[in-house]
Image (spheres, rainbow, N blue to C red):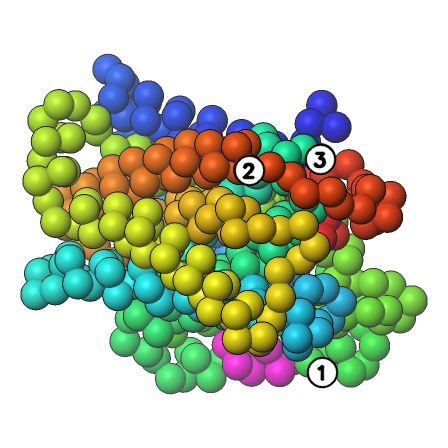
Amino acid sequence: MRRFLASDPAPGVALVAATVAALVWINSPAADAYTTLWDTAVGPASAGMHLDLRHWVNDALMTVFFFVIGLELKQELVDGELAHPRAAALPVLAAVGGALVPAVVFLMVTFGTPAARGWGVPMATDPAFAVGVLALVARRVPPGVRLLLLAIATVDDVLAVLVIAAGYSGALSWPWLAAAVGGCLLVVVLRRLGVSAIWPYLPVGAAVWYATLQSGAHATLAGVALALLTPAGSTGGRDVLAVLLRRLAPVSAFLAVPVFALANAGVPLSADSATAAFADRVTWAILAGLLFGKFAGITGTITLVTRTGLGHLPSGVTSRHVAGLGLLGALGFTVALFVTELAYTEAGLTDHAKIGILAASVIAAAAAALVLTRTPQEPTASPAATGDDTPGTGRTRTEAA
């Protein structure tokens, strides 16, 4: 069990299992129990926290997911693929292209309709699904493919955070926002005082999260901000960043993300619902944005960057591997569902968007596996030479890289 949990496919398997459970539950005779559970409101109303369980998952539990994303970005910037500007150019630009092109494609399809508000839905890549699919064909691809995917996914996730902040936050309360900034400054003060224990930061982090929630900005943004303030390297003889990643990456992969999928992936599926979904422009916009936009954005940018000499592909990575990466980028499951919940309030649009996300993810996974398994592998260095041990995103994406 420990070996499985430390393997690359494990987070993806957990996510798929939770998604299937949600779909089976909502389409079973117990569908009312599913709706009732996630619509149940708990929490103190006097503190502005009387939220239904789905909002608790999306606003609180997913903060752990975005906190881990921030930690991974910090690690990459300090001691990873993004630490060296020339090496970082390719994945950074590929991630930007892979985010902008899908948004443009989506807007072209939905222009002038209420569905256009979901322009951020096809922009992100789901790292758990993408790395899980890649792990199924890992012996057929050079290590550089995985490293490039991890770097692109890291930048991609951060771009998604910026999209949420810019496009899907409400009207801001400046006093509460100032309180959140004050909490972040207190974290800096604690760092300067050399506080390396984690527990003193917990109440401060909770206060920053609460102030962010009350400010109108999405509460999960607090997770990214606090992660970027985490010290890199040794502090008081302790590597706080590495400790937090080791402890929280499994929580994110095996608790936060699967519970999020269970709460949000429940879509009624029937002949009538499928007909209605594929008659709706939003479904086709998501399919086009993820399957065409992501592929064109990632592969086109990589081709442009390598031909202009701004960056270069890792050893052994060919144009067919790049095509596989473009298809893996279309696996936008977790963050796509997250942005869908933020973008739409109408149940019909939300359900149709989710059906589009599910369909695109299945098609992209199958196509990526087909392309990568049929791509001849060029001779590469041995695992010992590359430093690539037994794969495992259970350690964190950056540690595996």
Up the image or down, 303 lies above or below 319; here it is: below
Q: Residue 364 location in percent, x, y?
A: 39, 39
Whether the magenta-drawn stretch holds residue 378 is answered as no
For the residues labelled 3 and 1, say whether their Cβ atoms are less than 8 Å apart. Answer: no
* Helix, strand or loop at mark 2: loop
* Helix, strand or loop at mark 1: helix
Going by the numbered disc 2, the residue's amino acid type is Thr
Residue 208 seen by the camera: no
Question: Badge 1 local density, few (<14 within 10 Å), some, or many (20+)?
Answer: few
Question: Badge 3 local density, few (<14 within 10 Å), some, or many (20+)?
Answer: some
Q: Which residue is mark 3?
A: 6
Q: Quadrant of residue 344?
A: bottom left
Where are the magenta residues, as a range? 180-186
Residue 355 seen by the camera: yes
Up the image or down, 267 lies above or below 188; here it is: above
Q: CA distance from mark 3 to mark 2?
A: 27 Å
